[in-house]
Image (cartoon, rainbow, N blue to C red):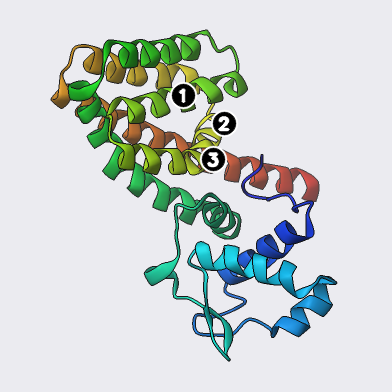
Amino acid sequence: MDYRNPKQRKSMHGRIVQELGMQIVSGAFAPGQRLPAEPTLCEAYGVSHPVLREATRVLVAKGLVVSKPRVGSVVCARDQQWYMLDPDVLVWTISRLPEVEFFRSLMTVRQIIEPAAAALAAISATDDDIARIGAAYERMEGAKTAAELLDPDLEFHRAIMTAMHNDMLAYIGNMLSLALTESIKLTSRHPNTHALSLPRHKAIFTAIANRDALAARQASVVQLDNARRCQLDTRRLGARARTAAVEVEIS
């Protein structure tokens, strides 16, 4: 799935949720603004009132709108009520944010969560957890292309979140995997992604396997610093390639 360009939902119910949700996230409907009246939306989408009300309930559940008697559906403030880790809300947000802004925001979240997760995993992981993390790393080593590296890289980070044995933190990690996929995709465009990524991930795995929380935290910090530099380098390389292409076209 391309989270930058979400595919249109097949069912009418899903389509209404997606289109209204993306309009809210994009700012087409401002906080405090009412959505179009129910009869108007029913006519626009060619659906019955029950179908529209069910779609509205989904938007309410995601924190995007609140239903008020005799008023209708009112858009909620982003910083107060939106469930930003809801998979749909996250995808819609990604699709609307400039790439640079999205990755800057995501990297801040990762720098807060992942080093602490690695440290806690070093303390809490069972032998089975460590084996799962190690198996993911071995698959990373065996990957021959950037595309093959994506799944084991994601599994590596999911396994660490699971190894914390904290349901709430594991849930947050699972929700972040959507955004993490996009982050890894960008990093994997770097020509030396394999050579740069593997030693850092191995250091994290080794520290967790040795039950060394401080080393696991530091190894995660180093890996994230490397990922941030790779993303910056990738964007610079992409900008240079686009400039060169324009110069060739002009000449």
Residue under the image location 44 percent in, 75 percent down: 77
Image: 207 above or below 115: above
- Mark 1 = which residue? 155
Judging by the rendered image, the residue that carries numbered circle 2 is: 189
208 or 184, nearer to the observer? 208
Calculate the distance from the C-alpha at mark 1 to the C-alpha at mark 3.
14 Å
Q: Could you say where residue 249 lies in the image, as x and y percent from the top left?
A: 79, 47
Tell how many labels. Answer: 3
Instruction: Judge depth for marks 2 and 3 and give the one in front.
Output: 3
Nearer the camera: disc 2 or disc 1: 1
At mark 1, the secondary structure is: helix
* Residue 29 visible in image: yes
On-image quarter of the N terminus: top right
Q: Residue furthest front?
A: 50
Residue at 21% of width from left, 30% of height from top? Answer: 120
First in residue order: circle 2 vs circle 3 = 3
**Is residue 77 found left or right of 122 in the rendered image?**
right
The amino acid on which the numbered mark 2 sits, given as a three-letter code, is Arg
**Residue 243 against residue 191 in the figure, above or below:** below
Q: Is residue 11 left or right of residue 244?
A: right
